[in-house]
Image (tube, helix red, strand yellow):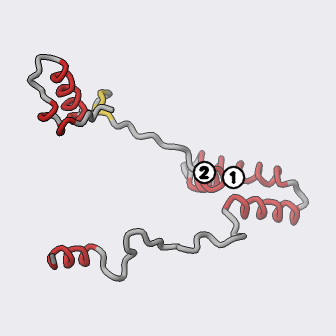
């Protein structure tokens, strides 16, 4: 039994968080501002200092971002868009050449369930101790 304890201690050294323990137990401080709010306030301040509307400042920034993007530098535009509006959702194709990935467990369960209904060779005892896994 001491071997298991030693192994567990090696996996979770005392300087690491233990299971169920948070690295930020207090959470985000109340009243702290997110980037979008800070950005909006910055735009309003710059607009006020320059005698322009926030919409005009936004337009000027988008023009700069557009010019940089035409020159091949997308970082400014991407950073602002991602931080103010959030990153776009990215989907991942979990297929192989357009075909779905094989599901051997599901195939096994379906085959054994059909055996039970068939000639009786696939008894409940031979398939997961009688549990119906297809539900």
Q: Nearer the viewer, residue 60 or 98?
A: 98
Residue furthest to the top in view is 119
> In what quadrant of the picture does the N terminus appear?
bottom left
Q: Quadrant of the C terminus?
A: top left
Q: What x and y, as percent, mark residue 31?
A: 72, 70
Q: Residues within 10 Å of mark 2 (few under 14, many from 20)?
A: few
- Outermost right residue: 51
Q: Position of residue 108 (x, y in %)?
A: 18, 31
Q: To which residue does mark 2 refer? A: 86
In this picture, is 91 found above or below 3?
above
Indicate the position of residue 23 as horizontal and vertical percent values.
48, 73
Nearest-to-viewer mark from 1 and 2:
2
Q: Is residue 93 left or right of residue 30?
A: left
* Number of residue marks: 2
Residue 28 quadrant: bottom right
Label 1: element kind: helix
Q: Secondary structure at mark 2?
A: loop
In the image, what residue occupies the spot 34% across and 82% down?
14
* Disc nearer the start of the sequence (1/2): 1
**Residue sitting at 38 percent across and 36 percent down?**
93
When the figure is inspected, residue 74 is found, relative to residue 37, above or below; the finding is above
Name the residue rendered at 29%, 30% in the picture.
97
Which residue position holds label 1?
A: 64
Query: Nearest the camera: 118 or 71?
Result: 118
Name which residue lies at 55% across and 45% down: 88
Q: Is residue 18 left or right of residue 51?
A: left
Q: CA distance from mark 1 to mark 2?
A: 20 Å
Residue 40's spot in the image, x, y percent? Answer: 76, 59
């Amino acid at each position: 039994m001491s071997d298991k304890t030693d192994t567990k201690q090696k996996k979770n050294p005392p300087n690491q968080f233990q299971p169920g323990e948070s690295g930020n137990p207090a959470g985000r401080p109340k009243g702290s501002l997110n980037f979008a709010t800070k950005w909006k306030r910055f735009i309003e301040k710059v607009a006020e200092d320059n005698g322009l509307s926030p919409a005009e400042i936004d337009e000027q920034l988008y023009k700069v971002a557009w010019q940089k993007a035409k020159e091949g530098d997308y970082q400014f535009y991407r950073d602002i868009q991602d931080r103010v509006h959030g990153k776009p959702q990215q989907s991942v194709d979990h297929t192989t050449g357009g075909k779905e990935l094989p599901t051997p467990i599901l195939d096994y369960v379906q085959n054994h369930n059909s055996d039970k209904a068939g000639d009786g060779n696939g008894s409940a005892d031979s398939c997961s101790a009688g549990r119906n896994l297809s539900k």
